Structures are given as structure tokens and as C-alpha cells.
Image (cartoon, rainbow, N blue to C red):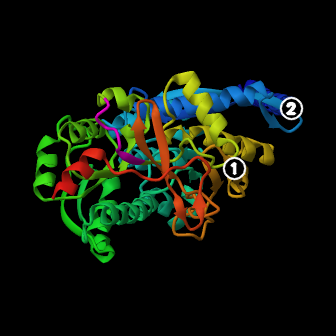
Amino acid sequence: MAKKGWICKLGVCLLGVGLSWSFAEAKPQEVKSVRVGVTGPMKSTDGENMWRGALMAQEEINKAGGVKLGKAKVKLELVKVDTNEEMSVSDAVLAVERNVNKVDFFVGTKRSESALAVQDVAMKNKKIFISCGAVHPELCSRVAKDYDHFKYFFRVVLNSTYMGKIMFLHLGDVAKIVKEELGIEKPKVAVLADKLKWADPIVAAVEKNAPNMGLEVVGAWRPSANASDVTAELAAIKEAGAHIIFQAVSGPMGVALGKQWGELEIPAALIGGNSYGIVKTFWDATGGRGNYMTTQTSVGPAKLTNKTMPFWEGFVKRFNDFPGYTSSSHDAIYVLKEAVERAGSLDPDKVVVEMEKTDYAGAFGRIVFYPRDHEWAHDLKFGPGFNTWVLIQWKAKDKVSVVWPYGWEGVTYEGSEKYQLPPWMVKQLKKK
């Protein structure tokens, strides 16, 4: 028995040595592709455009040979991850959890409430996650507060604080036009915004700062982002005598708003942000009633960089639609590609170091991230010479124009046009 036990132990030892030799001699598995999960509400316009932007980048990169890793080039692969995040936070989390071991990186997300939960999953698994749609500042303030844990998160769209600032700048421009063209000394402003977290700071900012701009705030209306009828809100806004409607809308309610605003010929300029109003299908969805509405987005038919118009025209030709702000997934893919190539590795810690060095002139403008000691670490840097976003105005079927920035801090992009008040508004208010 003793001899048998000794032989068994020897056998185990020899087996262990054999395994050690086997592992020592094995070559590291070659990387055959870089896999990126594109996460978003794929059944919605925003999710669809997120996928389209990423798809265009993938095809362009692979056509040029792929992603360089060391001396080799490998293909870029995309994995579509339908998060259903506009309807369910838990659906978004489960979708990402199911794919976290199938991809190397993530780009995407739209709804901030869901993005915060998805961010937790990605950070726990040390997956670089680039947001192309969720805009709440907390997503990046988390990086500043706990860098080691959240450092894998970046954003290629402006946060809602900057979005609000841009809307304010345009609000001032429109108020000036209302004063000059209609002779109204103190324009009245109504706020109409989603009843969602991302819009809270924008609504608060309007209520606090508009009076300092010589404007009167007549009220704030907060319908559901999924509302299909806002006639009651518009009637109340008209009754309040508003000359400008400041919108902050991210859901399908934006279609109802554009349509009913035009149908009722509300004598107030509809400006701000409406994510459903930045795509070509908005015209048909509103029956053309959304004409003259202005909305904020990350790209428009003007020369933000040398890459903007080729991308815009290529997107429209291929998909018969305008790229929405979530189509910034296109630039996110390129930023990721360049960081991976500089790192020469898919190791997330090495790629983060290179991501932080990003200075990329993309179709959506210049992309530079704030450093780790900024209050919004890894957020998109805003300002003249950096990223400004744009405001576009509907002018006719299939036609939108960039109307902001228009002389702001010396910035006017080639192809921009001056903002125009809705003709029915001019007609009704000039009578008074």
C-alpha cells in the first residue's frame, strides 16, 4: 500500500511537470480580429444610427487593411447589442452582461439612466466603453472621483451641461432676432423637456439664467419622453404667451411635438434639442409640420473638419437619412482604432493610456478628452478650436441647415446659414 501510494504521488508530480512544460512551450493565441460591441436601442432611430455610424467606420477600416497590431493587421468586427435601454434599465444590463466576454471593447448607449448601470458592468470587467449618446455629467464625474475603477470609460459626445450651454447661446441669438424683427422687448420663454434625469440640469439652468438674459420664463412642462400627444402642453404654452419654446427632448415625444407645433401654428420659435428631429425621417413622421424647428446635434451639413461633408454625404446616399448624434459611433471606432494601434495591444490598461492622448479630427469635429484631474475626466472637450456641436434648422423636405455656431467666438463653419423665424409666427405676432 505504501509503495502504491508513493507511485501515485510520483505520477501526480510527473503529470504536473508535464503540464508545466506543455504550458511553457505553448505560444500565445494570435489575435485574429478586434471585436467591438455596439450597444444601443437598436429598434429605435438612435440605435439604428449608432449601428450605421459604426458600420461605416468598420467597412472603411477593413477596406484599408484593418487594425494594425504590431507588425500584423487584423479585421475589425462589430457585434450588435440591442439594449432596449429606452424602455428598461435591466434589459440594458443583461444585454451587456451576455456579451461582455464576447467583445474586446464597447461603444454606444443612449439613455443615461441605463448607461450608468451598463457602465458598472463594463468597469467591473475592465472593458473600455465609449459613450456615443448618454450625456449625463455623472458618467464622467465618476471617472474623476474613482479613476482606477472607472478609467475605462470615455465619451465622444458633449455632456448635458455643455448641451445646455450651447442651447443658451442659441437662445440668446434667437431672442435677439425676436426683438429685432418683431419688436418684442422682453421675449417670453417656455421650457418643454423630457421627464428624465438627463434633462433636469437643463431645465434648472433655463429657469435660473433666462431672467438674467432679459427673458421671462412662463413655465416648464415635463411630459413623458414616450408621449404621443402634447397638444395640452402646447395649448398651455400658447396661452402663456411664449415667444420661444426651449425643448430638451430625447424620445419619440419629439415627433409629436414637432408635428403638433406646426399643425397648431404655435407662434413661438421651437429651439433646443430634439433627438428625433435630427434625422431625415422626421419630415415624413411629422408630415412636414416640423419645418423651421431647430435642434441640437453633433454634426450637420457644414465643414466642421475636412471629414465632415464626405461622411455626411456618404451617410445620406447610403441610408437615405441624416446621421444623428449617436452616429458619432463612427468617430468612436476610429478613436479606439488609433489608440489600439499606438498601444500595440488589446490590453485595456495600455489602451486607456493611449486613449487619453487622443487628438482626432473626425467627421463630428475635433475629439480631445479632458484629463483625469478634470471634474469630468475622459469627457469630450468643448470650446472654440475643440468640439462645438451644431444646431440645425429644418428649411424644407430633405434640407437642414447649420444655424449655430454662427459667429460665436469667431466660429462659423463653411456652409452655415442664419436662423430663420417660422413664417406663421412672424405673421401672427407682427399683427399684434
Q: Amino acid at mark 2?
A: Ala
Look at 65% across and 62% down and name the residue there: 385
The x, y position of residue 32, in whole percent, is 76, 26
Residue 191 in percent (x, y) is at 24, 57
Mark 2 or 1, nearer chain start? 2
Give the structural element (helix, strand or loop) at label 2: strand
Q: Is residue 106 above or below residue 398?
A: below
Q: Report how far apart the C-alphas of labels 2 and 1 lie in the structure.
A: 25 Å
Foreground residue among 151 and 185: 185
**Residue 101 visible to the viewer:** no
406 inside magenta stretch: no
Compared to residue 102, the image places residue 292 above or below, namely below
Q: Which residues are magenta?
A: 288-295
Assign a secondary structure to mark 1. Answer: strand
Between residue 247 and residue 426, name the one nearer to us: 426
Against 236, is 257 above or below? Answer: above
Residue type, mark 1 in image? Ala
Residue wearing tag 1: 361
Mark 1 surroundings within 10 Å by alpha-carbon count, few (fewer than 14), some (14 through 19), many (20 or more): some
Tag shown at residue 251: none
Question: Looking at the image, which residue is at 45% across and 32% down?
Answer: 47
In x, y percent, where is residue 251? 32, 40
Seen at 74% across and 44% down, the residue is: 338
Q: Callout 2 environment at 10 Å: few (<14), some (14 to 19), or many (20+)? A: few
Name the residue located 86 percent from the left edge and 39 percent from the top edge. Answer: 70
Instruction: Return the mark for residue 72.
Output: 2
